[in-house]
Image: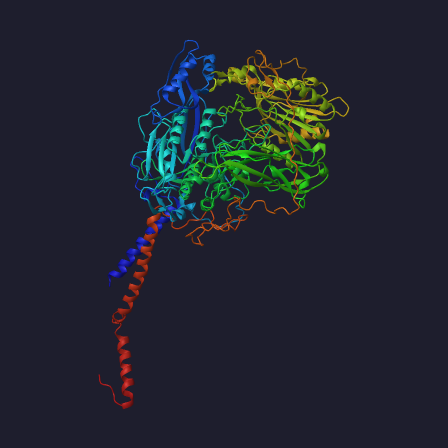
């Protein structure tokens, strides 16, 4: 019996130790104490979580070209096509570059050709062949991996191997760039408004997203090999997932189903020499320790980067072709860049998704700017992912929507599609063990793993395609409060709800976003930030149509506009344009909303909806011929106000802004050498967002002009703003603007630098034309601006200045701006002392220049005429690289142009000087031989001397004929974004307990209707899910058994324990004897 307490103590110690270890695992503080460590790596219990920073850059491979064909051909046929195309050209030294990889034995749609001394005519000769689609240069891709600690107190495990912090430089810092994130700082969504209990949140992301709930489920299906019914576990079985990264070592202990490892590089190895590819694969499919989502999935490892992080475009194209050949189901891609016009890459992504490959890609790390989405995540057929941390805070560094390739005439679409955990996520180490990383490239495999697991839950795999999977993810996503749609897309990944939707799914079409509510803030920002009114520019909402019925489809008839009469729907007009063909899996539905004339002085809410019917051919495997159709409804809700006065209306000129791609348009701030291209769209909702928000706060109504100046009614607006304009002007535009200003319209121009010598200095080698690119303009097209304002005796110079100064008691910074060369004598001019940046760029010399005129204000002489204000630098209102804002100056200029109120702080300033006559400094001339006409909407080539094109017709909207409904509109447009065939209230998840402990309570603003909060752990926190529950059950049983054994032992040994107390038992014995003898009167004997 004496051994029982000892055994009990040992059990208690073991149990406490087990809980201590589990607690350490929950906090991610000491992975090295649990898992076997890699002898080549150093583990530390105090090691912090790492942030992985990826940067991509490319350079052209000399003399090598990618020749793309119109179809797939054998190597012999491809060689014949190329030789026949070059036969008529001049004698060329050319040859086909051999590609020894797994795809070389199969037909291909491209070839890599080496041409010595290639001329432009020889390339054109190649492209003239009927079977050759395009000729582009071969690119060499460089990737830089840097691992940096998040913060000293993050307490997450990692592997402190200094060899992971290698960095490879390249000649160019841009093109297809960042896929992981920069420094690990996050900002809150605004929903944590009260104090609450903080708990350690475990970092096993598969369990946090409740993948183990699906693992415990199973379904019965036919085993085609055995011909019998079998029960299949939901662990990713039968799903082929491809990881395009740095490879994977052979027989890694975390993976049990590596189906194939392929090498597409010029190195003779399949192993991962850096660890990033292993980590990504572990998040998707690790089976132990840091468990992935789909441990039984078929892993196909594509090693597309060398140990020096070098790759080539042709490697990716070959690997993509092989992925199609192998019928890959899910593909995680780890590259991205701003060039959405990179045709070989974009075309191949379309081809992949058309072949039912579900592609997952991160949206990039160019935040917090808006309009910084990376390709291919910005494509509608790709699932674009953004990262959040475990407290649902969004990553500040992560890119944001909208897409910008629809500008200037249209409007961008909603991206990202979904957000999920990307901070402190655990994944597999390079050889064994686990590590914890943060980054956008971490969030991408989280979604890829979840998608792989979801695919394995569906019995009828024909229902799963890129569109249906995206429909399930976005329809089930959990919206984050306080975050707009260009930051979170449709919300946070909810794996369980996605499973419910996908297993009740019927092929159909859906819309993204699923409704338009211009009154819902902040989610519907920027639409909700400004009401609509009669006479304003139509509000354009670009909706994506997802077609889950097939890879191709079309819209039947025309979309129907049905206003709700009780909700004043007849007070708005709606025009709809749409894709003639939906391919692959998606198309667009552009909805233009305007206010009817009868509502010019009316203020109320108006509602209606647009009905769209999508048709798609029935699949080849179907026994039914014909087409499938699906009708979807797009609810519309807007706030109408009375038309504001002219003085409060500001028109932003978007039509004359150009950006990369396709041309080389340099940054406005030449100090930013690591970001040389102007690619953010120059829109009030992208890199001028803060300025727009400021103007709205000041009570101005800002509209966007996406057409020539000839296409707006100037009598409706007080001020026209031209900021950082790179485009030329039609002669008709110049004439109309002069008339408009004479009749009262005012003009504000924010210019930028333009200097021919500096433009030649900042040239770079073009990857598409294999030529040195000169900028087609400077920061702005100053010669074109001078043509526009010359009638009033104004002009900007070719000077380039920078420096700090004080104006009207405000600290200012002039970043690569120009000066005013000429201004009317009765105008107001402000000058400052600045540094000659042009001299510094050209000769590396420093010179201080006094009296540089930078600001001018002028009242035109015509009766009732408008006012003109010029400023030589736009960087102070541009979010891209703004150091000190000048919103106060913009307010002062708008007071001047809109109300003719001259700011006293400027008119009486000591910095006021006499207007320059124009003879002090020459005005800039256009760069001879520039190629602006290639990208211009205004110019066209003409015998070597570009000339203006014919003025295009103004956009004309065909307003839909309303079909009014005399019924009440829905009060809440967003519930759950339900698919038409699914009633979430009737979908029951089997074998799920109704109660689950919450890691954190619901915060204010969070819906209590969510029965499965995102921060819930569905069971134990250990990695070995299959072993944890039995272990705790066994220990619990042993504790209970030990308790009863101890109690039984105490009861049996009770008399013996009281034996040493001699006096007390003897006394009680004597008393008992006296009581027994008392009736007889006898005395007891001793």
Q: Position of residue 103 (x, y in %)?
A: 36, 26
Seen from the viewer's position, the closer of residues 867 and 306 is 306
Q: Residue furthest bottom?
A: 1081
Q: Residue shown at 39%/13% (left/top)?
A: 94
Q: Residue shown at 28%/82% (left/top)?
A: 1072
Instruction: Tell me the quadrant of the picture where the C terminus can be found.
Output: bottom left
Seen from the viewer's position, the closer of residues 891 and 524 is 524
Q: In the picture provided, is 318 more to the left or to the right than 932?
A: left
Residue 442 figure quarter? top left
Seen in the picture, residue 863 relative to 1053 is either above or below; the reply is: above
Q: Position of residue 395 (x, y in %)?
A: 49, 37
Instruction: Tell me the quadrant of the picture where the N terminus can be found.
Output: bottom left
Q: In the picture provided, is 533 more to the left or to the right than 325?
A: right
Q: Position of residue 41 (x, y in %)?
A: 32, 36
Seen in the picture, residue 931 relative to 614 is either above or below; the reply is: above
Residue 136 figure quarter? top left
In this rendering, does residue 435 appear at all?
A: no
Q: Position of residue 256 (x, y in %)?
A: 31, 40
Q: Residue furthest right?
A: 863
In this rendering, does residue 1057 appear at all?
A: yes
């Amino acid at each position: 019996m004496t051994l029982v307490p000892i055994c009990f103590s040992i059990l208690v110690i073991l149990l406490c130790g087990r809980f201590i270890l589990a607690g350490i695992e929950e906090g991610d503080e000491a992975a090295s104490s649990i898992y076997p460590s890699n002898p080549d790596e150093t583990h530390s219990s105090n090691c912090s979580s790492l942030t992985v920073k990826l940067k991509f850059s490319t350079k052209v491979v000399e003399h090598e070209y990618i020749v793309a064909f119109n179809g797939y051909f054998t190597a012999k046929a491809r060689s014949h096509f190329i030789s026949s195309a070059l036969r008529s050209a001049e004698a060329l030294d050319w040859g086909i570059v051999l590609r020894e990889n797994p795809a070389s034995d199969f037909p291909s749609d491209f070839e890599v050709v080496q041409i010595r001394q290639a001329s432009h005519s020889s390339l054109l000769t190649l492209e003239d062949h009927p079977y050759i689609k395009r000729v582009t240069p071969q690119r060499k891709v460089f990737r830089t991996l840097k691992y940096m600690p998040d913060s000293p107190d993050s307490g997450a495990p990692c592997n402190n191997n200094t060899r992971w912090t290698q960095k490879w430089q390249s000649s160019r810092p841009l093109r297809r760039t960042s896929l992981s994130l920069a420094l690990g700082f996050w900002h809150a969504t605004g929903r944590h408004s009260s104090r609450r209990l903080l708990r350690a949140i475990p970092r096993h992301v598969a369990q946090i997203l409740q993948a183990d709930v699906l693992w415990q489920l199973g379904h019965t299906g036919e085993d085609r090999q055995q011909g019998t019914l079998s029960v299949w576990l939901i662990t990713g079985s039968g799903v082929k997932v491809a990881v395009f990264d740095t490879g994977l070592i052979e027989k890694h202990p975390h993976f049990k189903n590596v189906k194939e490892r392929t090498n597409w590089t010029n190195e003779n190895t399949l192993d991962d020499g850096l660890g990033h590819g292993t980590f990504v694969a572990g998040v998707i499919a690790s089976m132990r320790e840091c468990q992935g989502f789909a441990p039984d999935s078929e892993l196909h490892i594509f090693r597309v980067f060398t140990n020096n992080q070098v790759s080539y475009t042709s490697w990716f194209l070959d690997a993509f072709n092989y992925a199609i050949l192998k019928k890959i189901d899910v593909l995680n891609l780890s590259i991205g860049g701003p060039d959405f016009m990179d045709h070989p890459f974009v075309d191949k992504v379309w081809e992949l998704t058309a072949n039912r490959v579900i592609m997952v890609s991160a949206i990039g790390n160019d935040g917090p700017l808006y309009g910084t989405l990376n390709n291919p995540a910005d494509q509608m057929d790709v699932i674009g992912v953004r990262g959040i941390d475990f407290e649902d805070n969004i990553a500040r560094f992560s890119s944001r929507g909208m897409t910008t390739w629809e500008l200037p005439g249209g409007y961008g679409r909603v991206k990202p599609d979904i957000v999920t955990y990307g901070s402190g996520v655990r994944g597999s180490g390079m050889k064994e063990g686990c590590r914890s990383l943060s980054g956008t490239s971490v969030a991408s495999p989280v979604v890829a793993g979840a998608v792989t697991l979801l695919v394995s839950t569906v019995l009828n795999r024909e229902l799963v395609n890129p569109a249906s999977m995206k429909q399930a993810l976005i329809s089930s996503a959990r919206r984050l409060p306080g975050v707009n749609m260009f930051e979170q897309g449709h919300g946070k990944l909810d794996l369980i709800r996605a499973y419910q939707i996908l297993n009740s799914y019927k092929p159909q079409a859906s819309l993204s976003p699923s409704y338009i509510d211009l009154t819902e803030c902040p989610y519907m920002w920027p639409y909700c930030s400004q009401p609509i009114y009669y006479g304003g520019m139509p509000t354009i909402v670009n909706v994506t149509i997802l077609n889950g019925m097939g890879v191709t489809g079309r819209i039947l008839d025309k979309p129907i506009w049905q206003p709700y009469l009780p909700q004043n729907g007849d007070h708005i007009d709606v025009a709809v344009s749409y894709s003639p063909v939906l391919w692959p899996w998606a198309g667009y539905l552009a909805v233009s909303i305007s206010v009817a004339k009868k509502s010019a002085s009316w203020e109320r809410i108006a509602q209606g909806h647009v009905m769209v019917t999508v048709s798609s051919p029935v699949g080849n495997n179907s026994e039914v011929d014909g087409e499938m159709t699906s009708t979807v409804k797009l609810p519309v809700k807007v706030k109408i106000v009375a038309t504001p006065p002219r003085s409060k209306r500001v028109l932003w000129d978007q039509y004359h802004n150009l950006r990369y791609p396709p041309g080389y348009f340099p940054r406005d701030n030449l100090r930013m050498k690591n970001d040389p291209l102007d690619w953010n769209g120059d829109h009030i909702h992208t890199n001028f967002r803060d300025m727009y928000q400021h103007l709205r706060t000041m009570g101005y109504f800002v509209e966007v002009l996406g057409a020539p100046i000839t296409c707006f009614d100037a009598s409706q607006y007080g001020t026209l703003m031209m900021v950082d304009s790179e485009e030329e002007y039609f002669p008709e535009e110049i004439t109309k603007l002069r008339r408009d200003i004479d009749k009262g319209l005012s003009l504000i121009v924010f210019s930028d630098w333009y200097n021919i010598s500096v433009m030649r200095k900042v040239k770079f080698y073009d990857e598409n034309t294999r030529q040195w690119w000169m900028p087609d303009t400077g920061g702005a097209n100053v010669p074109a601006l001078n043509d526009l304002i010359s009638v009033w005796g104004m002009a900007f110079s070719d000077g380039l200045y920078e420096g700090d100064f004080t104006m009207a008691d405000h600290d200012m910074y002039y970043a690569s701006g120009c000066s005013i060369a000429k201004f009317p004598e009765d105008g107001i001019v402000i000058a400052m002392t600045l540094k000659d940046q042009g001299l510094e760029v050209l000769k590396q010399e420093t010179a201080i220049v006094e009296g540089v005129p930078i600001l001018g204000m002028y009242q035109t002489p015509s009766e009732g005429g408008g006012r003109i204000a010029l400023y030589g630098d736009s960087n102070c209102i541009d979010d891209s690289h703004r150091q000190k804002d000048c919103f106060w100056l913009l307010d002062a200029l708008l007071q001047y142009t809109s109300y003719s109120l001259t700011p006293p702080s400027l008119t009486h300033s000591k910095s006021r000087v006499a207007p320059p006559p124009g003879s002090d400094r020459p005005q800039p001339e256009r760069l001879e031989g520039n190629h602006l006409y290639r990208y211009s909407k205004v110019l066209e080539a003409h015998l070597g001397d570009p000339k203006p094109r014919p003025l295009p017709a103004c956009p004309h909207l065909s307003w839909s004929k309303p079909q009014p409904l005399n019924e009440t509109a829905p009060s809440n447009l967003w519930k759950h974004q339900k698919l038409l065939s699914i009633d979430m209230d009737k979908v029951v998840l089997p074998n799920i307990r109704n109660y689950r402990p919450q890691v954190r309570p619901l915060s204010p603003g969070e819906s209590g209707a969510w029965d499965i909060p995102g921060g819930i752990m569905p069971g134990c926190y250990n990695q070995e899910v299959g072993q944890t529950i039995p272990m705790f059950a066994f220990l619990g049983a042993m504790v209970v058994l030990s308790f009863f054994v101890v109690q039984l032992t105490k009861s049996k040994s009770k008399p013996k324990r009281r034996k040493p107390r001699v006096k007390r038992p003897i006394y009680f014995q004597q008393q008992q004897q006296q009581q027994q003898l008392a009736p007889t009167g006898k005395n007891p004997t001793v």
